[in-house]
Amino acid sequence: MTRRVVITGTGLLTAVGNDVQSNWESLLAGRSGAAPITQFDPPADFPVRFACELKGFDAGEYMDRKEAKRTDRYAQLAMAGSVQAMKEAGLSEGLEGVDAERTGVLIGSGIGGIATFEDQHARFLQKGPARVSPFFVPMFIADIASGIVSIRYGAKGPNYATVSACASGAHAIGNAFRSIQVDEADVMITGGTEATVTPMTMAGFAALTALSERNDSPETASRPFDAQRDGFVLGEGAGILVLEELEHARRRGANIIAEMVGFGQTADAYHITAPAVGGEGAARAMRMALRSANARPEEVDYVNAHGTSTPANDTNETAAIKTTLGERAYQIVVGSTKSMTGHTLGAAGGVEAVISALVCQKGIIPPTINYSTPDPDCDLNYGTSGATERGVGLALSNSFGFGGHNVSLAVRRWDG
């Protein structure tokens, strides 16, 4: 018999809040996190001068300050989200009362410590190899977030990182879910993290023409499914879940937020950056998630869409949702919280899985903001008139990445 997996802790940091509660309040209020860049001074010829940065984040609240100085921002965010999630789950450092060898960490990141790489490469060019930090490699590599979280908690179970561009966080959660299902672990700390508001990252995405260039109005730039969308807004953040085998959680008396019930993963095998026509790969991932959840399309109440605000994604994702859900697609809310948080790349799957769990728990769906001009190819209910109060029994959370990676996670309301 397949073991059931529940969510017992959440941690969330985005441009609209540095913890779960502040994020939730901002999302329901429809607040945009986009603003002019503060982490570096964009040159005069920089095409994009805004992003969705965290406000007032202090790594010292979660880590020893000496350790924080030797840790890239992406890993600092992972640690912060993990501390929040573990506290909510009632799990302590040292994992008292829990088998450390059956507690794992699986945190995805699409790019890893790019800020460290840029800084150290500049130092190498200006001052030579002797001035490169001895901490450069452990600060830069994409698996170190999982490593330092496992060290913090003494978690000795499955431990690695997933790297699949903007599907990284969702892949991490899906594989952590599977690890518990197949009895490799009882508890998994999992999700995604990213901190890429850097000159090279932004210049690269701008060169791809993937970013919105609405420098005169950052707060309205991310406009998923709107006919005038012109690209995504780069964001940073982390979304972390504590997943736990159901009976293990019950024995601890843990508070159960929602149940993780399905995971689908596919490849487009089509193009390095463009989605497959009609969202063919995305539709297969959603169908796979429903199949693994033993759920029917008519059970779905909400889709947290990948919804990037790019012309190609939003059209193809809409087609994929209609292919998967049929008439049910027109009866549910398909929301994009990226309209507020921006696109957090490898963190997005973690961020949006947390949000999907909260939607199931609380029965309120955050809006998709900045929608003003209908697109005939995007004809679903995107929740554009404000937060929607409705019971959500089953939610799908979609994440798609460059390279043709598609992931869909299924989360079910916990009714006890």
Image (cartoon, rainbow, N blue to C red):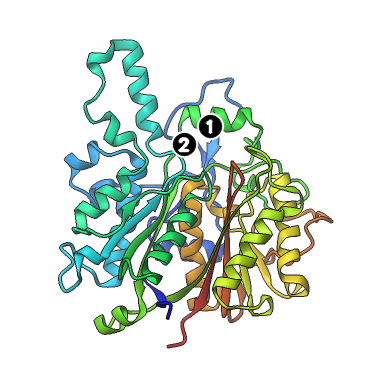
| Tag shown at residue 202 | 1
Quarter in which the N terminus is drawn: bottom left
Q: Amino acid at mark 2?
A: Val
Query: In the orientation shown, which residue stands out farthest toward the front?
Result: 1
Q: How many marks?
A: 2
When asked about the image quadrant of residue 87, the answer is bottom left
Query: In the orientation shown, which residue stands out farthest toward the bottom?
Result: 416
Label 1 – label 2 distance at C-alpha: 7 Å
How would you rate the neighbour count of disc 2 (Cα within 10 Å): few for under 14, some for 14-19, many for 20 or more? many
Q: Position of residue 335 (x, y in %)?
A: 63, 63
When asked about the image quadrant of residue 90, the answer is bottom left
Secondary element at tag 2: loop
Q: Position of residue 9 (x, y in %)?
A: 35, 69
Q: Earlier in the sequence, mark 1 or mark 2?
A: 2
User: Is residue 225 in sight in this rendering?
Assistant: no
Residue 135 to residue 351: above or below: above
Residue 286 to residue 233: above or below: below
User: Which residue has dot 2 on it?
Assistant: 197
Secondary element at tag 1: helix
Q: Position of residue 22 (x, y in %)?
A: 42, 62
Q: Amino acid at mark 1?
A: Met
User: Is residue 232 in sight in this rendering?
Assistant: yes
Q: Position of residue 71 (x, y in %)?
A: 27, 39
> Decide: marks 1, 2 in contact (CB < 8 A)?
yes
Q: Is residue 7 left or right of residue 342?
A: left
At 79% from the left and 53% from the top, the residue drawn is 373
| Tag shown at residue 340 | none
When asked about the image quadrant of residue 270, the answer is top right
Quarter in which the C terminus is drawn: bottom left
